[in-house]
Image (spheres, rainbow, N blue to C red):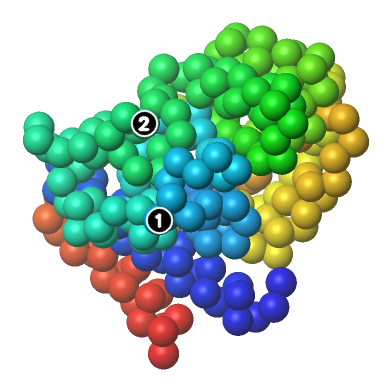
Amino acid sequence: MDAATKKQLELNAAKIRRGIIEGVYNAKSGHPGGSLSSADLMAYLYFNRLNIDPAQPKKADRDRFVLSKGHAAPVLYSTLANRGFFPVEDLATLRKPDSYLQGHPDMKKIPGVDMSTGSLGQGISAAVGMALSAKLSGDSYKVYALLGDGEIEEGQVWEAAMFAAAKKLDNFIAIVDNNGLQIDGPIDEVNSPYPIVEKFEAFGFKTLTADAHDFDSLDAAFNEADKADGRPVAIVMKSVKGKGVSYMENNVSWHGAAPNAEQYAIAVKEIEDVIAALEA
């Protein structure tokens, strides 16, 4: 990946992080930790990878993205807004009673959302169904699903994985945000899903790894994922929960909490400093 592209992606990711903080702060609730950990991935997908068009959010040949860990809605909303699907200013209405941006994504109300999600495990199941539909219809679009590493403790995830492999859905890419923390603590202490890579391999997936905060690493993994060989793909990306806000990083208490005014100011300054440096 060339330096100019990488710098632009870093800028997009920083703006996505700014939108996450803006939304969660104004809502006084939400899930910043797992949203921030996946901001770089979302910048990469929506500004560099996916076949999408904000002017035609329902175009038939678009790639599909499903946020299986639906509680990380702030990162999806901020990404869609910064990509032009709806006004960035609307992020401040997150979770307000009269807002279309509720705590979990709603495909009937939000442009660019391909599946309503929230109950963990169900998103990947819907995404696998979309991939099967594409195969049956002879369509060329790909389907991407982002899962949390705590989410993959759900049995439904593995039913979907088994089905994807059985149907040879090599147009399906599962991405695991492996930040190591879930609401109750470290994933290996709550109900360890490890070894994640080996599990997906055992279920018949082509498995890859990536650094969630390194665009060259992400690019290499997704380029390899494009080499279809009859197997669905799983990309396990190692990430830092709360990435980009110093006091939130690797701190499980920020899984589902909103910053107060002082914390908000600190977070915004840290992110704005990054944006200013990239725009200089």
Mark 1 or mark 2: name the one nearer the start of the chain.
Answer: 1
Q: Position of residue 119 (x, y in %)?
A: 41, 17
Quadrant in the picture for the C terminus: bottom left
Residue at image position (65%, 80%) is: 3
Tag 2's secondary structure? Answer: loop
* Residue 248 visible in the shown view: no
Residue at image position (20%, 42%) is: 94
Q: For residue 55, which numbered disc appears in the image?
A: 1
Relative to 257, does residue 52 appear above or below in the rendering?
below
Residue at image position (81%, 14%) is: 166
Indicate which label's residue lies in the foreground, 1 or 2.
1
Q: Which residue is mark 2?
A: 107
Number of numbered discs: 2
| Nearer to the camera, 231 or 209 | 231
Query: What is the three-letter code of the residue carrying label 1?
Result: Ala
- Disc 2 packing (10 Å; few <14; some 14–19; many ≥20): few
Quick check: 190 left or right of 97? right
Quick check: 62 left or right of 96? right
Quick check: 25 left or right of 63? left
- As drawn, the residue found furthest toward the bottom would be 280
Relative to 9, does residue 69 appear above or below in the rendering?
above
